[in-house]
Amino acid sequence: MTVGQLTGALGSSLRPLPPIWREGRTPLEYAALLRDPVWRGEGVPHGDGRQTLLVCGFLAGDPSLATMARWLKRTGHRPVRAELRWNVGCLGATVDRLEERSEEMVAESGRRIAVVGQSRGGSCARALAVRRPDLVESVVALGSPLRNQLDVHPGVLAQVGLIGTLGTLGVPGFFSNSCRSGDCCATANAEAVAPLPSGVSLTSIYSRSDGIVRWRSCLDEYADHVEVSASHIGMAVSAPVYRAVARALA
């Protein structure tokens, strides 16, 4: 990302956002999930054993979706980790990695997979589906800025700029400032917003009280939209989100 692009993104992020302190309710959402019948798999459609790739969000790793993985297994799905230690890499390289992972999954099962991605993970999943509709049958995005990956809270945007600077200085595994407009991510950036291929479904789950991503950026013209009441981080442990995910995967 260039300085000009970062400045422009910061300017757009000055538009009103829900207070970021609302993200502090995540522990309460997790506690509510454990008391909710949906956690036991009650009242929602169950899967038929299809493999479901889980893709974590920005500054997160596979463990951030561990609770969802346990629930998916309980409700008849086969959750598979993306094997991302920390989702801060070049978008192009990340989608390439997900493509390889998906190829392995399809080779094993003989059928297309579902992908559930949180935040940046949903944008990566969408790009993967555009690139390889022969591998991906459905995508469920949780609080993902599908229309504009930088339409986020200014505090988070500052972290994006910091990671980009570190990557530009040569820190391994981090995206660099050139990723936004450079050749390394040109294909993946285009895929992230391209028309969705026929035969692939996209469900975007969003919350107007999301304190990280501006909810309007979750409204993708090719997606079915489901509004929930949840924090951004808490979408990984939210009972209303789990019900929406179960319906989408069904």
Image (cartoon, rainbow, N blue to C red):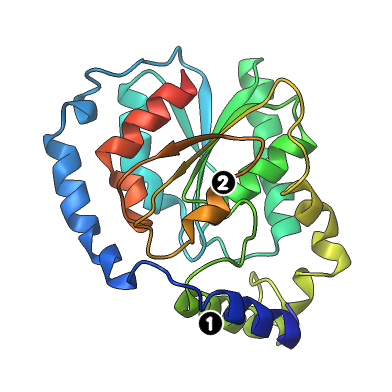
Q: Which residue is labeled 1 in the image?
A: 158
Instruction: Tell me if mark 1 has few (under 14), some (14-19) or many (20+) residues whose alpha carbon lies within 10 angstroms of its own.
Output: some
Question: Could you say which is closer to the camera, residue 165 or residue 248?
Answer: 248
Question: Could you say which is closer to the camera, residue 150 or residue 42?
Answer: 150
Quick check: can you spot residue 62? yes
Left/right of residue 44 with respect to residue 47 in the rendered view: left
Quadrant of residue 3 in the image? bottom right
Quick check: can you spot residue 171? no
Position of residue 218 relative to residue 14, above or below, is above
Residue sticking out furthest to the right = 183
Q: The residue under label 2 is which amino acid type?
A: Leu
Position of residue 114 relative to residue 130, above or below, is above
Res. 73 mark: none
Residue sticking out furthest to the top = 48
Left/right of residue 92 with respect to residue 141 in the rendered view: right
Question: Could you say which is closer to the camera, residue 139 or residue 172?
Answer: 139
Question: Could you say which is closer to the camera, residue 180 or residue 111?
Answer: 180
Quadrant of residue 198 in the image? top right
Could you tell me how far apart the alpha carbons at marks 1 and 2 are, in whole angstroms? 24 Å
Q: Which residue is labeled 2 in the image?
A: 219
Residue sticking out furthest to the left = 35
Instruction: Name the residue: 16% across, 38% down.
Output: 34
Provide residue 103's location: percent of width, then percent of height. 71, 31
